[in-house]
Image (cartoon, coloured by chain):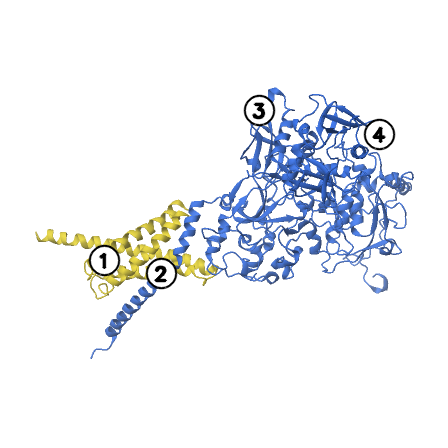
Chain colours: A yellow, B blue
Amino acid sequence: MCSVGHSRFPRLEKLAVGVFVLSFLLLTIVGVLTTWVLGIPLEGYWLLTHVSFGGIFTVALAALVILWAHACRLDGQDTGKKACFWLMTVAGLGLILSAVLSMFPLLGTEGQEWMVSAHGVCAYLAMAAFLGYAILLLYDGRKPRAEEELQR
Amino acid sequence: MGRNGHRDPKAGHSGTSKASAPARRRPALPTFLPWLSICFALCLTPVLPAQVAPEPTPPWDGSLSTPVHRIPLFDELEEPIIPEFRYSLPFSARHTCGPCHPYETISGGLHFNSFRSQPLEDRQPPVDRPGEPWFWVDPRTGTQLPLSYRAWPGTWRPQALGLTPWKFTQLFGRHLPGGDMAEPEDTLADPDSRWEVSGKVEINCLGCHSASPLQDQREWAIQMARENFRWAATAASGLGEVGGMASRLPGTWLVYDGLNPDDTEWAVPPFVEYDLTQFDSKHQAFLDVVHEPPDNRCLYCHSIHFVDKARWARQQDVHAAAGIGCADCHRNGLDHQMIRGYESEAAERGESSRAEFTCQGCHIPESVEDEPRRGRMGAPYPAHKGFPPIHFEKLSCTACHSGPWPGEEPVRVRTSRANRLGIHGQARWDTVMPQIVEPVFAQGADGKIAPHRLMWPAFWARLEGDRVIPLSPDDVAEKAPEVFEAEKQVGSVLAALALDPDATGEPVLVAEGKLFRLNMDGEVDGEIYDRTLSGTVWARDQEGEVVPCVSPFTLDDEGMLDYDTEGRILGTLRALTSAKLCESEPVLLHKGRIYRRTWEDLLEGTDLTEGQFESDAMADEPFPVWAWLQQGRLAPLVPPLVIQAAAETDGREQELTESQVAEVLQILGKAIPEEDRKTTSFAYISGGRLFRLTGEGKLSATSHSAANPYLWPLAHEVRPAAQSLGIRACEDCHSPDAPFLFAGIRGVGPLLSGDVASRRMVDFLDLDENYQRLFAYSFFLRPMFKTLAVAVSVLIGAVLLLFGLLGLRNVLAFVRPSE
């Protein structure tokens, strides 16, 4: 099952999931708040916060991938959540690469601008994966009650 | 049919000839009409030339070659110049160049329009981006005041300080291009002006467009200093020699008066003797003019000198090193609206073509309709690898590429117009003041960070409430002449003592632990003195031994002086009298007696009466004391305050001490009526601080907006790309001790004081210093972050690859044919 409680290191798993969720939410809030709500560029203390939690997100994502990759392999069961997991993995990798490659003297101005755009696209994909997984998790959470009620 | 068998065109379509019809005749004109027309034309001839519009200048025919300018010269009366004529006037650019190059159009150009284009009201916005102003520098009063007609924030309008166009031209004519305020339309508006004597300063076309090696702008500066305004361009061009001095002529002199046969030595009117070898048989002169001015012409007014760097060690602008001249970028049309080259100029002026001559226009041009635009004038295209695009929104190109590499403190520079550079010769015109530093990174008018030059203003002012009104340095010097120019006051006394033919040894002054000697500038040079003499002693250096001018003496039993002593005293008094340093009489005080020189040139001694001396210290001096006697009261030769100031400022570039400032403020304050003293006072501004007297008469310093420094953007010298900020690492700017953000800038000025303003670069950048430090510290973690991110990426990538391959295996297993 592609969810909490199915790995060999449950405490580590819970920690990784908690840190991942927290960091991702904060990163999303900062990004969305500045870009959509306030209409200001991501700079100043907003940028510092975003970059700081980006590092935490990186570690948490890596931990989650290692812990859940096997459980989340596509085998015809729980396909939805597994798909969200892999989408988040790919998008997360894109987020990390688009951020860190900009820090090396590799890309010129056009490349840098492309990286910023790619970071945004990956962010949208990650948000979609996160939301999808959350909805499916909620749906799965409600499902046993419905079945219980039918059996009564 | 017509003649020769051709059809008569007048025959008509019917085929019939109309030749048989009666011919139509033009009506006969009255016979008197032509004569009337001729008379009418003759009557109007004197009037017509003034009413007929001048012929338009023929447009450029497209040829890229420069026409050879072998042309007749015309003077301001539009008369052709005959070079052999003894009383020729200087040539006039308006009437020589103007017939082909419309003078009025050119006179609206950037170099010539500050006076005409100035905002009429003080509150109107400035005309364009701030630039280098004119600096009214008066070392005597410690004044360095930025002036501009263009109303740039932080500058003062010349008229606010009583500077008329005449006075402005007198002050700055050395580096004026002509025209503008120096060619006023109304020459009678200022009763103190002498435009009728000196002439107006026309636009000096050759000052920019002459390629002749004879073009000498130093000569321009000299003629302008002599107030030979209408002759300056001729002298500078090398077409002729100009003599005489308009400044010595009476105000009633006119150019038609010519030379004065009775005075051929002093008040000689300006005259010009043309170099006949530069004229042909038709009195045409060859002017070696070029379309694009050579760099040398621009550099006369626009040179920058790094004070601590020798000329040979100076790094040239990368564009100049590549062979690009000033005029290759700073172009203009006939209107002479030169391109300044800053990024927002095109938008401000509504001329998109100006954008092509900015940094971006050459190096990162935008393609137009899929037409490639890179590589203009061989400009390399910068990749800016690893440079986040946010920097292009926050920084101008010059922030990373121009000016000296930022150090712990900005470096001292001097500019042509501010510090009077480029006037070569035996005499030194260049000045230390104003003190200018660069680079100072600040937000420009367009909101982008750019490097600037900075100058702390220094001036005397009247305070009305919180409002600061600058005072003319001439007015201040006039009110307190005895307080200023400490070194010169001491030097003038030493120069007077040197006039004593019977005295041996060099006159010196021992005071404040120093020994002062007279130098060639009429001021003094000090050296440490720690020998026998103490106090303030006017002495003589006799082959290394310093002895007072008059050693302590006693009277004999008959109350008489010995012959040698009497001779020395008389000789010194004679020398001080003949120098005419002031209206007072020089005397000598010693042991309760005062010695004076009588009208018979004899020495007379009388007893001192009580209250006759201003300072008790004078009576207590162990050595004979020289003093001035005026209206029964005694005063030292040079006030102690001034001697102290001379000692403190000796060897320094500061001109004033706090004691002098307090003394001057007291003198100025006495002129304020009693009822106004609560709201009006005087102050002195220097080093970013405003100094004023407290109620107890002490000097106190505060901050004030009028004391803020004036900044103007710089663009040169451009460093090579390998020397741009950030080329090594982000830490060039983003580190806790990066000069770009945290360099210190201390106030400097003519006042010797420890109370000066102290700023950091972030103060001018309008940035949060705490955030910038925090952000800078984050760069310590950056390498770690990058390593972690790369490692994580590799790990995630490996997992994706592994499970991707596993998934691929399943796909292949699914599609394999069943056994």
Quarter of the image containing the N terminus of chain B? bottom right
How crowded pointer 2 is (Cα within 10 Å; few <14, some 14-19, many 20+) is rated as many
Which residue lies under the disc numbered 4? B601
Give the mark nearer the N terminus: 4 vs 2. Answer: 4
- Quote the CA–CA distance across marks 4 and 2: 99 Å
Vertical side of B628 occupied by B388: above or below: below
Chain for disc number 3: B
How crowded pointer 3 is (Cα within 10 Å; few <14, some 14-19, many 20+) is rated as few
Mark 4 or mark 2, whichever is nearer to me: 4
Q: Can see residue A72?
A: yes
Q: Secondary structure at mark 3?
A: loop
Amino acid tagged 3:
Thr
Mark drawn on residue B741: none
Apparent side of residue B39 relative to residue B207 in the rendered image (left or right): right
Q: Which residue ends up furthest to the front in the rendered image?
A: B557
Amino acid tagged 4:
Asp
Quarter of the image containing the C terminus of chain B? bottom left
- Quote the CA–CA distance across marks 4 and 1: 112 Å
- Quote the CA–CA distance across marks 4 and 3: 54 Å
- Quote the CA–CA distance across marks 2 and 1: 20 Å
Mark drawn on residue A12: 1
Amino acid tagged 1:
Leu
Quadrant location of residue B371? bottom right
Q: Residue at x 77, y 53 (%)?
A: B215
Q: Which residue ends up furthest to the bottom in the rendered image?
A: B819
Chain for disc number 1: A
Which residue lies under the disc numbered 2? B789
x then y, percent, for residue A54? 34, 55
Amino acid tagged 2:
Ala
- Quote the CA–CA distance across marks 1 and 3: 75 Å
